[in-house]
Image (spheres, coloured by chain):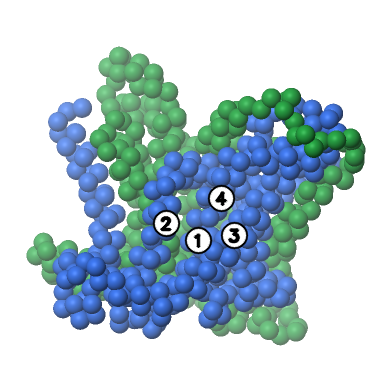
Chain colours: A blue, B green
Amino acid sequence: MSYVAKTAKYATLVLACLVTLLPISVIVMASLKTNQEFFTTGPFDAPGNWFNLENYVTAFTRGKMVQGFANTAFILLFSVAGTILIGTMAAYAIDRFEFRLKKTVIALFLLATLVPGVTTQVATFQIVNNLGLYNTRWAAIALFMGTDIVSIYIFVQFLRGIPKELDEAATLDGANHLTIYRRIILPLLKPAIATVVIIKGIAVYNEFYTPFLYMPGRDLGVISTSLFRFKGPFGGQWEVIAAGVIIVLIPTLLAFLALQKYIYNGFTSGATK
Amino acid sequence: MSNVVRAEAAGTRIEAGQLPATARKPRGGWGWRGTPYVFLAVPLVLLVVFTYLPVVNMFWYSLTSWDGLDKTKEFVGLDNYVAVFTRPELFRVFYVSLYYFAASFVQMALALYFATILSFSTRFRNLFKGILFFPYLINGVAIALIFVFFFKPDGTLDSILALFGAENLQQQWLGNPDINNISLASTSVWRYMGLNFVLFLGAIQSIPGQLYEAAELDGASRFQQFRYIIAPSIKPIIGLSFILAISGSLAVFEIPFIMTGGANGTATFVIQTVDMAFESLKVGLGSAMAVILLVIVLVVTWVQRKVVPEEKVNLT
């Protein structure tokens, strides 16, 4: 490549990284400033004390972030476990059995991928309400479990690569379908389960709309809604909001650094459903 | 893309001989026809309750003037639909989604550019890839707050302009109705570009390296390599991104809702629907809007599947 082209290439890359990192960096700096410091300095001025964690303490205690993490963890645990159970069961039935309504069932799942969740909330809300789930964490859990067709797809794709002879041999040895599902299919699906855990986990952690709509209770805040509620009481305290943003961001960053390869693979296999 | 998963599956070798020791005599026979339905019961119930029932109900609500609380729902025919199409303030949200639709082209162009240059050997390749992708993983509320700070008076953007002595360009980035939708759409580009980028990069990297070598031997330039090798092989994923761009730009919610609350002409379809159904208690009208949105998305998807030939979107 010519010298000019090479320079242009790296220049654009560096510029893109600046555009990505600059908005976040100024938030990091703002989160370390005192209130007075925040008002007297510009966004690019470094904080006086790089170890001033006071805003983080305020965000955690008065901003109910601990509760937010606890609620998010609860929802995450149940909805991810449920998604895996439901997804693997559906995939097992679809990939390993021939039955009369198979085509209909597949069509039902496929058609549902075309219905964007946000469009039907008006009516979903009434159902959740009638089921008595409104303003409980189970509302979010039920919704996260009930509409995840992408994971069923990922499981079906993966299951196809697992030879059917395994099931048949197990049958000859006297295993029933539940045993085959539990002892053969589930363990072999581990890599696909890891993929689903990652993309589902990130999606649930980041979800705002569902908890905002279905769990308005003060003590039912998840990460997203707790942070959203910072806007009111801390409206004039940007340094505290900034700390809240960074608190939410750190788990994502750690997960990304630890699981990079799996995250890339997960999103490429999930997005092309 | 899912061949990533499939490839791994192929790599998992299990000898048919090593079966669980617990497997014993045949119980519930292989032949019972109800078995698949047992496994499908829970998934199907959830699917019907949380996807199909809402769709059906929504059609019904859209024909009533229900407020969401009343025991009875008064049938009003197509009145709600007429209202959506004749009241300009309701129809305006379609116009707002055009900003996001236009932005998604910028987003795809940027993603394609970075995916192409990073598919050739580059120093710090993984670092660049990671930084460009990371915003996609960030919590939407956090992103919205980061960009409220970015656009606020004397915020990051104004300070950058001051740094270059362009104070005269400073303005109400989120308040001025002429540009606030552009500010919001740019935030959306910042957030979602990484996903397009990683998808494109994955597609480009699945092209066998020999093709480039052969092309280079034939004296093809970088641009020709792009035009004749890269472009054709990422066509399906571009088609997919295009469809996601349309439904995505109609379903925009978080960024404008958190950053401006839909004020000053930034309300999107979803903001207005939520507002209508849950704040103004006009469930009937809100449902009609949601039905219209759903129909548009379905039509667009159908057109895309007609235009871009199907590849591997099948569950069987």
Q: Circle 3: is it few (<14), some (14-19), or many (20+) Cα within 10 Å?
A: some
Mark 1 lies on residue: A205
If you read the primary sequence from the N terminus, does the residue marked by circle 3 or circle 1 appear first?
3
Residues indicated by labels 4 and 1 sit on the same polypeptide chain: yes
Whether pointer 2 and pointer 1 mark residues with C-beta atoms closer than 8 Å, the reply is yes
Residues indicated by labels 4 and 2 sit on the same polypeptide chain: yes
Residues indicated by labels 3 and 1 sit on the same polypeptide chain: yes
Whether pointer 3 and pointer 1 mark residues with C-beta atoms closer than 8 Å, the reply is no
- The CA distance from mark 4 to mark 3 is 10 Å
Mark 4 lies on residue: A197
Q: Circle 3 marks a residue in which chain?
A: A
If you read the primary sequence from the N terminus, does the residue marked by circle 4 or circle 3 appear first?
3
Please tell me whether residue B236 is drawn above or below residue B190 in the rendered image.
above
Q: Circle 2: is it few (<14), some (14-19), or many (20+) Cα within 10 Å?
A: some
At mark 1, the secondary structure is: helix
Q: Circle 4 marks a residue in which chain?
A: A
Badge 4 amino acid: Val
If you read the primary sequence from the N terminus, does the residue marked by circle 2 or circle 1 appear first?
1
Mark 3 lies on residue: A77
What is the quadrant of residue B99 in the picture? bottom left
x, y percent for residue B33:
89, 42
- Please name whichever residue, B275 or B149, is drawn nearer the observer in this view of the structure: B149
If you read the primary sequence from the N terminus, does the residue marked by circle 4 or circle 2 appear first?
4
x, y percent for residue A53:
29, 71
- The CA distance from mark 2 to mark 1 is 9 Å
x, y percent for residue B81:
61, 71
Badge 2 amino acid: Thr
Mark drawn on residue A252: 2
Badge 1 amino acid: Tyr
At mark 3, the secondary structure is: helix
Residue placed furthest toward the front: B21
